[in-house]
Amino acid sequence: MSPPLRLIDVPALARIRAQDWGNGEYWVWRVTAYLQGESHPRQSSPERVVFVAESKQRVVGFVAGHLTRRYKCDGELEWINVLSEYQRRGVASVLLRQLAEWFRERNAFRICVDVQPKNTVARSFYRQHGAEDLNLHWLVWPDIRRLLEVQG
């Protein structure tokens, strides 16, 4: 089980997010605001979580999620990112499973995620883990517990 996020980890998360888009300064602000409840995704509740993956005491990936009512979902995967040199090693799958467990503990079963239509790698990853198309930008796990059963 990966540890929950510590505020000292925020700069590391920002660097990981910035490898795909934006810069570290922006992501430090954005992740901090998300964690402190100053940034609210549409229809989200204040309850949210971030789990980190570490290797040799270094943050190599993270996943963030929160409870929501958007698209009649119970929860939303906000971000999942892994350093490029740790990708395709199962890190994202472990993080996704941990977030799924967090949702299950809160009786949040219908989980959605926003993914750019052209991000075929992410869309494929989510589909391999049981997500289905909801609309052009969103995928949904109708029941996230299935992911835990299949991989459990």
Image (cartoon, grey):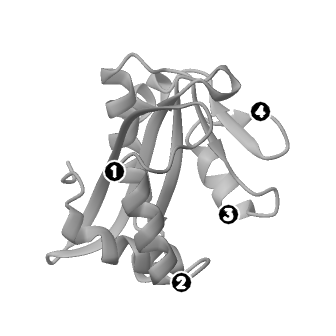
Quarter placement of the C terminus? top left
Q: Is mark 1 on a helix, strand or loop?
A: loop
Q: Mark 2 points at which residue?
A: 23
- Quadrant of the rendered structure where residue 32 is? bottom left
Taking the spot 49% from the left edge, 27% from the top edge, the residue there is 144
Q: Which residue lies furthest to the left in this view?
A: 57
- Which tag, 1 or 2, sits closer to the chain's start? 2
- Which tag, 4 or 1, sits closer to the chain's start? 1
Tell me if residue 82 can be seen.
no
Q: Mark 3 points at which residue?
A: 121
Q: Is mark 2 on a helix, strand or loop?
A: loop
- Which tag, 1 or 3, sits closer to the chain's start? 1
- In the depicted structure, whether residue 146 falls above or below residue 24: above
Q: Mark 1 points at which residue?
A: 36
- In the depicted structure, whether residue 30 falls above or below residue 148: below
- Which tag, 4 or 2, sits closer to the chain's start? 2
Residue 59 screen position, x and y as percent:
27, 72
Q: How far apart are marks 4 and 2 (CA)?
A: 30 Å
Residue 56 screen position, x and y as percent:
15, 78
Q: Is mark 4 on a helix, strand or loop?
A: loop
